[in-house]
Amino acid sequence: MPNNAESPAFVYKPVPLTKKLHTSVYGAMGPSQPSVSQAGKTVFITGGSAGIGYAIANNFALAGAYKIIITGRTRQKLDEAMARLAHDHSDCDTKFEAVVCQMSDSRSIDQVFDNLGANAVHVDVLVLNAALNVEGTLSGQGWEKTWEQFVVNTRALHQLCDRLHRQDVQRKRKVYA
């Protein structure tokens, strides 16, 4: 009988869901289109210092967001991302802010939202991009790493959504659920 403990439980194979696959931005969905304008909006992006999160921040700036707040785990990476964003978007009025926030620490998330509230910053758009992926099998990584992934990938997302919702309730603004 073969030992399946070390073989992957599944193999990822992309399945096309549309007839046409776009590999770049096209007219109807371009961030500079008036129909997708983010003028006046404050955007909060977790994991915004690199990769997809950084690209999302870039596109919200192109869409004219008023303020973009990116979070990350380290100040150095956030500062580098901020410098690139400020340089690439020096011709627009978008304000950029970088905040160190540990998604694995609920107090860190609460502190960030408490500070936003204390400074009368209202988040209009929440982008949940931060994630923790540990390679290997569940049995190989142990329960501690599995739990850490759950905390970052599940608990933190619910907490962030809750804080977004509560900022509107506290300010007696219209809440969208």
Image (cartoon, helix red, strand yellow):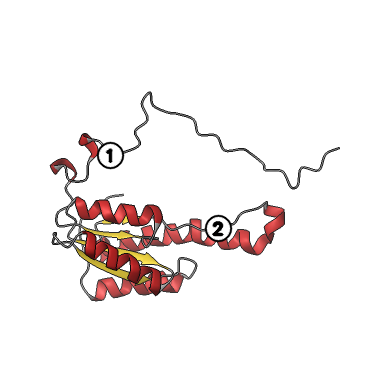
Residue at the image position 61 percent from the left and 38 percent from the top: 11
Q: From mark 1 to mark 2, how far is it between C-alphas?
A: 33 Å
Residue situated in front as seen by the camera: 160 or 62: 62
Q: Amino acid at mark 2?
A: Phe
Residue at the image position 37 percent from the left and 57 percent from the top: 161
Residue at the image position 21 percent from the left and 45 percent from the top: 31
Residue situated in front as seen by the camera: 142 or 107: 142
Residue at the image position 45 percent from the left and 61 percent from the top: 156
Residue at which label 2 appears: 150
| Disc 1 residue crowd, few under 14, some 14–19, many 20+, Cα 10 Å | few
Compared with residue 76, is residue 35 higher up or lower down, i.e. above or below? above
SS at circle 1: loop
The answer to which image quadrant residue 106 occupies is bottom left
Where is residue 157 drawn, in percent x and y? 43, 57
Residue at which label 1 appears: 25
Q: Amino acid at mark 1?
A: Val
Is residue 122 among the parts visible in the rendering? no
| 157 displayed left or right of 32 | right
